[in-house]
Image (tube, rainbow, N blue to C red):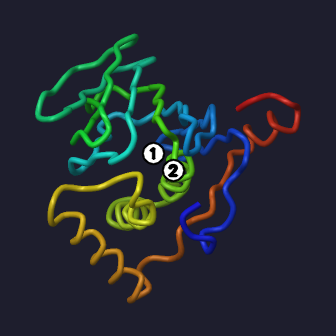
């Protein structure tokens, strides 16, 4: 965890349901020497607003259901069920889902380096928020994990400034604690994985 003030992160695999904004299931918690394995469901029309990179992690995406478009290093690919893409560490990339098709995918980031916690907090930030408030909440989370995600050139500095001002003027609260879905809690109590 980057900052103890963020609150605890589940030590076992967990699931976060962000309602109409998607679902995240952490299948395997990663670390400095272990990959993180995630399953995500993203709604139709979802996309990264800007190009990003993971400085120290490779990202392997496998589409399970639906369609998504992934741009890696300026080359765009359309991925359908069973298709995969490997994004090398440090490669600039962005992805989006078509406006008529949600997507379910499995993502493995190697090494994990806390990315499962970052995504858990992002999906929690998406719950119950929309529009600018949702964007600011997610940006607030992303800026708290600088080893996991970076943005191009001046955008990274601009995002830090926006988050700083949002906190200063109390437009942003603290980084959210991960809210595990009730289904995952019941499965964990019964001894099953989410």
Q: Dot 2 lies on which element?
A: helix
Residue farthest toward the bottom in the current orientation of the protein: 169
Reading the image, the residue beneath label 1 is 21
x, y percent for residue 174: 53, 75
Query: In the picture, residue 7 is in which quadrant?
Result: bottom right
Front position among marks 1 and 2: 2
Does the CB distance between marks 1 and 2 fall below 8 Å?
yes
Q: Which mark is residue 123?
A: 2
x, y percent for residue 21: 45, 45
x, y percent for residue 112: 52, 41
**Residue 73, placed above or below residue 65:** below
Q: Residue at x 29, y 27 (%)?
A: 100
Residue farthest toward the right in the current orientation of the protein: 190
Query: Is residue 98 found left or right of 40 in the rendered image?
Result: left
Q: Nearer the viewer, residue 158 or 78?
A: 158
x, y percent for residue 142: 40, 59
Q: Quadrant of the N terminus?
A: bottom right
Residue farthest toward the front in the current orientation of the protein: 33
Q: Nearer the viewer, residue 100 or 31?
A: 31
Query: In the picture, residue 179 is in which quadrant?
Result: bottom right
Q: Of marks 1 and 2, which one's residue comes earlier in the chain?
A: 1
**Residue 25, placed above or below residue 171:** above
Residue farthest toward the left in the current orientation of the protein: 74
């Amino acid at each position: 965890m980057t900052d103890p003030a963020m609150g605890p992160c589940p030590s076992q695999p967990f699931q976060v349901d962000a309602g109409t904004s998607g679902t995240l299931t952490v299948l395997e918690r990663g670390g400095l020497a272990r990959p993180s394995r995630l399953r995500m469901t993203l709604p139709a029309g979802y996309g990264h607003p800007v190009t990003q990179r993971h400085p120290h992690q490779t990202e392997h995406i496998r589409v399970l259901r639906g369609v998504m478009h992934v741009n890696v290093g300026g080359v765009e690919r359309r991925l359908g069920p069973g298709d995969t893409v490997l994004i090398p560490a440090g490669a600039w990339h962005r992805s989006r889902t078509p406006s008529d098709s949600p997507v379910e995918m499995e993502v493995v980031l190697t090494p994990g380096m806390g990315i499962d916690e970052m995504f858990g907090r992002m999906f929690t930030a998406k719950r119950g928020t929309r529009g600018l408030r949702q964007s600011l909440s997610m940006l607030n989370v992303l800026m708290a994990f600088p080893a996991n995600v970076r943005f191009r050139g001046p955008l990274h500095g601009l995002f830090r400034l926006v988050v700083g001002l949002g906190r200063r003027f109390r437009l942003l609260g603290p980084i959210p604690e991960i809210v595990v879905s009730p289904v995952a809690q019941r499965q964990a109590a019964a001894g099953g994985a989410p």
